[in-house]
Image (spheres, helix red, strand yellow):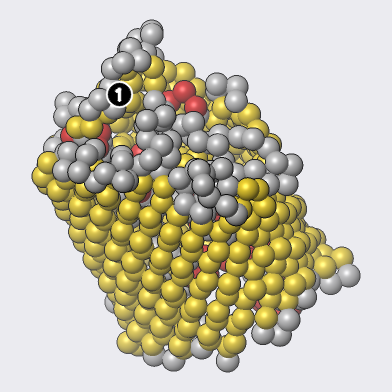
């Protein structure tokens, strides 16, 4: 038996961009694929959720340099960067807040309990990613707490050959720096080395990545170091062990990130360690078991005055230890999935104090396809939190196959978001203060959609309605007051999402067209006259058009995206990549924001204008 990472979704050839003739032939043979969640296995043609996949092959061809930029090209995902080159960014799905999206690595939760501002502080280089899976909608039944609007699952690669690699890259806007008494131009540069070792019984991979930039405006310089290691041991055909360890150091100028205009001289240093140990056991033809333990440790050092560390400095130390046990039992009338989990959160902070809380949960799922043309997946997540007590979150997914290529799907379910430690306890006067009396957010979402899948074409079009009770927002009623979070009322969202993917080949050149559009109509029951920190900038219209072409030697891609927020702020961005491959060497040239658009994704922070990048990569394998 060959084990596959959690929630693996390998789509048909139409959904995967290709890299090389051998890989093309392999993927062309895939007609039916399997969804591997933490517990249940579901064929893709019978999957009843709104899921999007970005594969490693596609990431290689896109004009991106880091995980943040990759997420910004996904359908329904709102990536709001405070700084480029992976410095800091918030991510949300379908109009939710950045705290309502759960981030996972191989199915293990890595969202930050201090504040979701750090959830994307992940020590995983792009070359270690096999694919990124985005599950949209209420996902508590599948992943547990804080998956209120959806989940992003980053799946790392499984080693299949021994190899070494080294790559260097650099880029610039070729604009002069605007700092006082500083010469030169704005730039970024990075290097990465990696190696993998394949053996029939065990496999290993390790990467070290270092990036540096002097920013794109005053006090936005950044330095980023990542170390990543993963190992696998196949005990026999039915038992496997996997372990992962990673470290990330992220230092950046935070001009305007959180408290503009007063934080012009601010700086932040974030260090993250993440480790996991899991095993997979096929105990019989019917019974599968998978335990896992993980630990995420994070240090956050925010310096409001980077030249005076004795004043307005915030230091936070957060640790989350998790244990999980997932299982699956197959019967003739359906499959049962059962799971248990515990997460122990701790924080010691200079302006939040010392706090502990624990979360314990149980999953129960059942899936059957005994009814003609109908698949049913139902279940619930039962949660006990030491601050908020008992909560139950049920859900059901239905799919009806009209023809072998057309399917109607319907899903409905509930989910929640537990306030972060920052929401509850922050004391950062006069700018921000927490509220220890907050309730958790609860949501119910219902979606209906139609899907089409053939060898070369995949399409999805759907409508959803979400109602969040006790929605949390940071607000104030006077410009001189500090921001403070409150459960301000019900947040209701009507949404339409569409995604079309078409691939074809002409004269050994493979083409890919990916078109997506999302519309959100959001309303919020709240008191008149308040000033909101986050909720007034959600997306209303979002469109994307990705065009890609490649053969064995070269590849080219154009990424277009349009964003319009409910405040009527809008912008259109176009990025371009051209790549060329030799036997052991490949190179690429990027031009991002080629029309030099001035735009802001969050707060008052202008993002870079036109930016050029060049990279060279050497790789040997056997």
Q: How far across and how far down the image is residue 339, in percent?
A: 26, 57
Quadrant of the rendering where the N terminus is positioned: bottom left
Quadrant of the rendering where the C terminus is positioned: bottom right
Q: How far across and how far down the image is residue 18, in percent?
A: 69, 68
Q: Nearer the viewer, residue 193 or 511?
A: 193
Q: Would residue 157 be visible to someone looking at this image?
A: yes
The local secondary structure at tag 1 comes to: loop
Q: How far across and how far down the image is residue 93, in percent?
A: 48, 39
Answer few, some or many: residues within 10 Å of disc 1's Cα (few below 14, many 20 plus, some between 14 and 19): many
- Quadrant assignment, res 247: bottom left
- Left or right of 550, for residue 325: left
Total labels: the figure holds 1
- The relative height of residue 479 versus residue 144 in the rendered view (above or below) is above
- Left or right of 23, for residue 246: left
- Quadrant assignment, res 320: bottom left
- The relative height of residue 529 versus residue 609 in the rendered view (above or below) is above
Q: How far across and how far down the image is residue 261, in percent?
A: 41, 29
Give the residue at x 31% y 39%: 304
- Left or right of 18, for residue 490: left
- Quadrant assignment, res 44: bottom right
Give the residue at x 20% y 55%: 319
Q: Which residue lies furthest to the front in this view?
A: 181
- Left or right of 262, for residue 314: left
Q: Nearer the viewer, residue 56 or 138?
A: 56
Q: Which residue lies furthest to the right in this view?
A: 507
In the picture of the structure, the residue carrying the numbered disc 1 is 483
Give the residue at x 55% y 36%: 606
Q: Would residue 145 be visible to someone looking at this image?
A: no
Q: Nearer the viewer, residue 560 or 177?
A: 177
Give the residue at x 48% y 64%: 211
């Amino acid at each position: 038996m060959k084990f596959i990472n959690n929630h693996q979704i390998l789509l048909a050839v139409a959904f995967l961009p290709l890299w090389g003739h051998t890989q093309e032939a392999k993927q062309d043979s895939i007609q039916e694929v399997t969804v591997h969640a933490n517990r249940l296995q579901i064929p893709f043609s019978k999957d009843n959720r709104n899921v999007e996949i970005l594969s490693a092959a596609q990431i290689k061809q896109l004009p991106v340099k880091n995980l943040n930029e990759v997420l910004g090209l996904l359908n329904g995902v709102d990536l709001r960067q405070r700084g480029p080159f992976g410095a800091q960014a918030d991510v949300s799905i379908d109009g939710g807040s950045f705290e309502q999206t759960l981030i996972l690595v191989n199915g293990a939760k890595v969202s930050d309990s201090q504040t979701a501002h750090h959830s994307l502080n992940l020590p995983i280089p792009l070359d270690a990613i096999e694919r990124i899976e985005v599950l949209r909608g209420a996902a508590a039944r599948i992943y547990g707490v804080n998956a209120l609007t959806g989940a992003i699952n980053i799946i790392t690669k499984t080693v299949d050959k021994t190899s070494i690699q080294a790559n260097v890259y650099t880029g610039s806007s070729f604009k002069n720096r605007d700092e006082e008494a500083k010469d030169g131009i704005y730039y970024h540069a990075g290097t990465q080395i990696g190696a993998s070792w394949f053996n029939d019984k065990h496999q290993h991979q390790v990467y070290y990545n270092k990036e540096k930039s002097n920013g794109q405006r005053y006090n936005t310089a950044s330095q980023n170091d990542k170390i990543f290691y993963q190992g696998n041991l196949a005990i026999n055909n039915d038992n496997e062990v996997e372990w992962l360890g990673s470290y990330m150091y992220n230092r950046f100028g935070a001009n305007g990130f959180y408290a503009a205009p007063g934080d012009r001289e601010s700086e932040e240093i974030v260090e993250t360690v993440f480790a996991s140990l899991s095993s997979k056991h096929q105990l019989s033809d019917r019974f599968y078991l998978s335990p896992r333990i993980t630990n995420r440790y994070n240090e956050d050092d925010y310096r409001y005055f980077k030249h005076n560390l004795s004043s307005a400095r915030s230091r936070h130390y957060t640790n989350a230890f998790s244990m999980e046990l997932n299982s699956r039992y197959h019967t003739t009338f359906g499959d049962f999935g059962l799971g248990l989990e515990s997460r122990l959160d701790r924080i010691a902070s200079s302006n939040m104090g010392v706090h502990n809380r624990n979360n314990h949960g149980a999953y129960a799922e059942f899936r059957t396809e005994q009814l003609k043309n109908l698949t049913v997946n139902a279940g619930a997540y039962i949660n006990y939190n030491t601050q908020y007590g008992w909560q139950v979150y049920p859900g059901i997914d239905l799919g009806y196959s009209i023809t072998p290529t057309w399917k109607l799907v319907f899903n409905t379910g509930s989910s929640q978001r537990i306030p972060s430690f920052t929401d509850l306890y922050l004391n950062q006067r006069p700018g921000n203060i927490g509220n220890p009396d907050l309730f958790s957010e609860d949501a119910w979402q219902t979606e209906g959609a139609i899907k089409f899948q053939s060898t070369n074409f995949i399409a999805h079009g759907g409508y959803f309605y979400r109602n969040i009770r006790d929605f949390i927002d940071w607000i104030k009623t006077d410009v001189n007051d500090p921001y403070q979070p409150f459960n301000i009322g019900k947040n209701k969202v009507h949404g339409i999402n569409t995604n079309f993917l078409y691939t074809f080949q002409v004269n050994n050149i493979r083409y890919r067209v990916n078109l997506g559009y999302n519309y959100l109509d959001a309303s919020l029951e709240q008191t008149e006259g308040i000033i909101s920190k986050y909720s007034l900038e959600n997306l209303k219209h979002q469109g994307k058009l990705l065009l890609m072409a490649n053969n064995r030697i070269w590849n080219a891609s154009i990424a277009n995206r349009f964003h319009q927020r409910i405040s009527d702020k809008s912008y259109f961005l176009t990025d371009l990549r051209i790549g060329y491959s030799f036997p052991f060497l490949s190179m690429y040239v990027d031009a991002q924001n080629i029309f030099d658009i001035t735009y802001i994704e969050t707060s008052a922070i202008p993002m870079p204008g036109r930016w050029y990048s060049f990279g060279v990569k050497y790789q040997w394998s056997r």
